[in-house]
Amino acid sequence: MQEKQKRWDDSVMQMPKGMTLTDHGNYIEITRRWSKTIAFFMTVFSVFWWFILAKILPELWFSDSINAGWERFFPVVHVIAGVGVGYAALANWFNTSYIFTDKSRMEIRHRPLPWFGNKVIEASQLGQFYVKQVIHKQQNGTQSANVSFQVRAKTHGGDDIKILSGLRDNQQALFIEQQLEKYLNIEDMRVRGEY
């Protein structure tokens, strides 16, 4: 079967940067490349973090001033954090999120590096898609400029399912919502908390 790229009409919003939509005939595939900008900053932070650890970790680990108790394992927390940030940086460099959906089920996958959020959902359960804005606050409670978006779904049973999160561009989130509703013939309706 020959694959064809989806054609757009005036009633459909433009495809945002970093995304593709492919109509395979019996299912659609929406892809979203992860942010290279975030990957760059995470990589710089990770390199800095590991440089600092390489300088101070041997002194902390083998210092006579640290008791033989739990204090000796305190640096392990920093190593785990460094591994986590490094892995997240690699994921942002290389990963793409995929949403495959046909009339019976939807599958969300993040590849090539394993990541949270992979799932399979029965399409018959899905009643409504919506976009939620997530505002990340600083520790003192003031609102920061760090905002992300999630594509979520309400099921006929009343459950709220996260489809995709961490989207920095609201147009990407709205595009995904629109295309899933259009393909699954779900009428767009307002949802409490919707962006």
Image (spheres, rainbow, N blue to C red):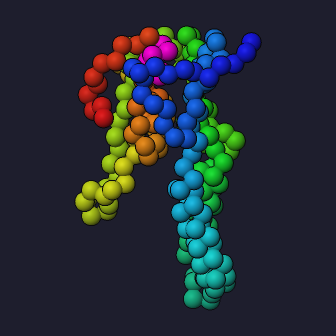
Q: Find residue 69 and report its image quarter.
A: bottom right
Q: Is residue 38 above or below residue 68?
A: above
Residue at the extreme bottom: 64
Instruction: Provide the residue span drawn in magenta.
Output: 179-184
Residue 183 part of the magenta-drawn span: yes
Residue 134 screen position, x and y as percent = 35, 44
Residue in the foreground of this view, choosing between 180 and 21:
21
Q: Where's the N terminus, which quadrant? A: top right
| Residue 85 visible from this viewpoint | no
Residue 148 part of the magenta-drawn span: no
Q: Find residue 62 and report its image quarter.
A: bottom right
Residue in the foreground of this view, choosing between 37 and 14:
14
Residue 163 screen position, x and y as percent = 48, 30
Q: How many marks?
A: 0
| Residue 183 visible from this viewpoint | yes
Residue at the extreme front: 10
Left or right of 126 in this view: 97: right
Residue 144 screen position, x and y as percent = 31, 58
